[in-house]
Amino acid sequence: MTDIQILGITGIPEVTAGDDVGLLLVDAFGVDSFRADDVVVVTQKVVSKAEGRLVHDEDKDAAIAGESVRILRRTVGGMTISETKHGFVCANAGVDSSNVQEGHIALLPVDPDASARRIRSRIQHLTGVDVGVVISDTFGRAWRLGQTDVAIGVAGIDPFLDYRGSTDAQGRTLNATRIAIADELAGAAELAMGKVENVCAAVIRGAAIKRGRGRATELVRPPGEDFFR
Amino acid sequence: MTDIQILGITGIPEVTAGDDVGLLLVDAFGVDSFRADDVVVVTQKVVSKAEGRLVHDEDKDAAIAGESVRILRRTVGGMTISETKHGFVCANAGVDSSNVQEGHIALLPVDPDASARRIRSRIQHLTGVDVGVVISDTFGRAWRLGQTDVAIGVAGIDPFLDYRGSTDAQGRTLNATRIAIADELAGAAELAMGKVENVCAAVIRGAAIKRGRGRATELVRPPGEDFFR
């Protein structure tokens, strides 16, 4: 029986600019609690706060414009669907106010893959354990209602599980299947977080990830291959 | 500490038309093993096989056309992105050959929500436990590379966790957040399955789901509100 655990990390204090996210995670989860097959999923909001990526909310329109390289759609409700500098397509270029102090909004980290690498090496330094790290954010989707958490930063793992060329249980070649495992990890971690309780990180233990020097920007479908951009 | 488990169900035999999927799940997982907070995730392929939704692979083009109500795009690689009768937007209307016997392809269940309800009531009848059920399939996405598992059938749970109108840890109203929890459950279950090993179902234990009479078709963004259809 395959057995995967999703362990919500409680007890992380309110994060402010300059905080050491890796240290906060180690303090909250326990210095001896990490294992080598763990993937630590941290929400974008924590990372953005620690990196000082907050602006006043009266500057929201300018912030969205500044974070966007291209506007895809503007909704009647005043939401913008745009492509961020990282290549992500999401609402309001990832700028939002939930779980941010009154009067402020948070921008996405400048380089979430670099943020993930810093958190990973900090955890490794503090615990001696080489975990994978995913930074997650809550994105809407085309065609389907509701949002799911996806990976915007990755360190220490391949964001894909690539079955292309392998054979299925019938011995047939799986031609097209390449699972965006980093996105499934982000979504799975969300199950242990909720949006209201202040659980902003989770450890996923036992998933069949492939270790590697992956980046979340690999998950961006190149605009030239994207029929819906 | 929130603790969620994803338990892959092993030992399900090769499924053929007429098989009782609920019974196969109970036999494989154990009649006394289910708990009331479990969500049982079963892959579409198992359900389609049990419902006899296989056709000869030389009829693939006709099958895709028959399953589609509208073609969104045709790729140079010969893939069709279409809207199915259920409203799902996916590659080849969900018709594919992986994990299907040589010479055949599988179509999506006619009514996956009804399939999920049948499996749920069968498990309840056999075990006395009222679990949630999700039927999952592997879909590509706009804007992001790789596929993730999503819900195409749901029974016994609300497919959403709706935070609209609730307050976050800062006491601010979360305006837009409605998590597609059924899709996150499907993706999380995929972590315990893999595509190659013959693990075609998983139990997710301890997730903060809301019980209810939900349907996966609620996850379909109405075409009139969809900017990318």
Image: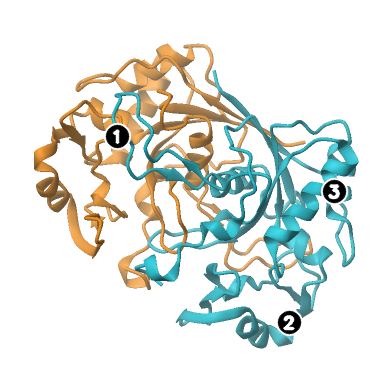
Chain colours: A orange, B cyan
Letter of the chain that mark 1 sits on in the rendering: A
Q: Describe the element under mark 2 as helix, strand or loop.
A: helix
Q: Which mark is residue B122?
A: 3
The residue at which mark 1 appears reads as: A98
The chain letter under disc 2 is: B
The answer to whether dots 2 and 1 both sit on one chain is no
What residue is rendered at 74% in x and 32% in y? B36
Q: CA distance from mark 3 to mark 1?
A: 42 Å
Q: Relative to residue A150, is residue A44 drawn left or right? A: left
Q: Is residue B133 shown left or right of residue A13?
A: right
Amino acid at pointer 1? Ser
> Which element type, helix, strand or loop, lies under badge 1?
loop
| Residue B8 image point, x, y percent | 73, 40
SS assignment at label 3: helix
On screen, residue B157 above or below B73 = above
Q: Which residue is mark 2?
A: B57
Between the residue at mark 2 and the residue at mark 1, the CA separation in whole angstroms equals 49 Å
Q: Using a 10 Å C-alpha cutoff, classify the residue at mark 2 as few (fewer than 14 neighbours), some (14 to 19) or many (20 or more).
A: some
Residue B116 is left or right of residue A223, and the answer is right
State how far apart marks 2 and 3 are (Cα): 32 Å
Which residue lies at the image location 42% right of the left edge and 42% below the top edge?
A213
